[in-house]
Image (cartoon, rainbow, N blue to C red):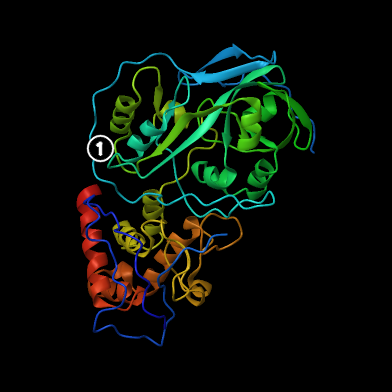
Amino acid sequence: MASPPASRTGPVPGPSGDGGDGEAPAARPPGTRPDAARPRPEKKRRDPRGGARPRRPRRSLPFLIGGIAVLAIASTSGGVYAALTTDDAEPAAAGTPPSVPPGAAGDPVNVATGGQVAPLRRVVPPDVLAVGTASIPAAKIKRIAKLGQVKDVTAVAGGAVQLQGRQVNAFAVDPSSFRSWTPPATAKKTELWEALAGGRFVVSPAAAEQLQLTRGYQYPVVGRTMPNLTMGGSGPLGLPGIDLLVGKKSGGEMGLVPNVAILVNAPGVDPAKVVRAVTKVLGPGTNVLNLHESKYESSSGGGRSSSYLDLYKKAATTCPGLSWTVLAAIGQVESDHGRNAGRSSAGALGPMQFMPATWKAYGVDGDGDGKADIMNPFDAIPGAAKYLCANGAGRGGKQLYRAVWHYNHADWYVQKVLNLAKAYAARYD
């Protein structure tokens, strides 16, 4: 029922890591068949767009976790100006991480005007956090971004400030893009990110409780300057040692150090290898943390975001007999795992490219927030599993072939998806 797909914006990386197989043509080949019985997913083009008093603390805040320390420097204004710093480390040997699996890829969305933030479009779970003693040079950030197995990199300003008489590690971030790097429950709290865009600050739940902070109240935040900022809310940030977020403007005024920390997303790759590769680029004096280590996951307050790989695997369990590799292959061909999730020329939307009529019949509220959102991977991926299962994908063989054909009515498409699924199975199973 839909028109031919729009052309891809570039090659789609697959399990082989060379990106050669995943580029869809601009029009369907001969032999494409229409289907008047069922609506179906299609292709794309991006479409942007006070409470009770807290309990008193019982123990000290775990602000400085995993070797992240603070170096206070007296500023000319007499306040405390601090930079995140680490112990010196020997450069590790270069690691060559394996090829890139399904990940949360794509360009960050832009900040909307008027204090609003762009909708959550992507999932970008950080695998590695690197913190320097000073600004990390742009050339080194680019080198890390170009490592063959790295999907996403974001650099943030940071430093240690004083809040309620305590020293707190803070990041200054763009709320529209940074929300994707936080745990799902936090990323989905749009009101939290709108508060950040409006000049308020956001803290971890531990900081909110133990510093006795109340949403809607103003507090002096001491850096190079001492602005009175309003607490906009709290939520797990998923980053060890980081308990405060401010907007870029507030961070600049307080003197937080530009590009002092970077987050790296390299899904499916051994994080230890990524740590070694990043450490070699950054050199001594930078602390590079493997966020998959249990001590960081347990201290991150709610865990880190699920990757697309995790979402495919979880969604497949809702359809007995359906392999997660089929969902991963479809996710790669349709949107490159969220990279091109906008509206197609035919009107399809989201990371799994559903037509709106199809979504009405098969949409799923996968994250339990009360809404089946076609643009949300937590909903769209289980929705794709539901659609495939309804067409017999769990029975395998010819039924699987037919189910994938219903997703996009072309034999070349089915063959492409099944071949990619085999490659994922060989790579990960």
Q: Is residue 429 visible?
A: no
Residue 347 rendering spot, x and y as whole percentages: 48, 74
Q: Number of marks in the image?
A: 1
Q: Would residue 414 appear left or right of 173 to someone viewing this image?
A: left
Quadrant in the picture for residue 61: top right
| Mark 1 crowdedness (10 Å alpha carbons): few <14, some 14-19, many ≥20 | many
> What amino acid is labelled 1 in the image?
Pro
Q: Secondary structure at mark 1?
A: loop
When the figure is inspected, residue 81 is found, relative to residue 271, above or below; the finding is above
Q: Residue at x 24, y 77 (%)?
A: 411
Q: Is residue 28 visible?
A: yes
Quadrant in the picture for residue 329: bottom left
Which residue is identified by label 1?
Answer: 97
> Quick one: quadrant of the N terminus?
bottom left
Q: Residue at x 66, y 21 (%)?
A: 223
Residue 210 rendering spot, x and y as whole percentages: 68, 24
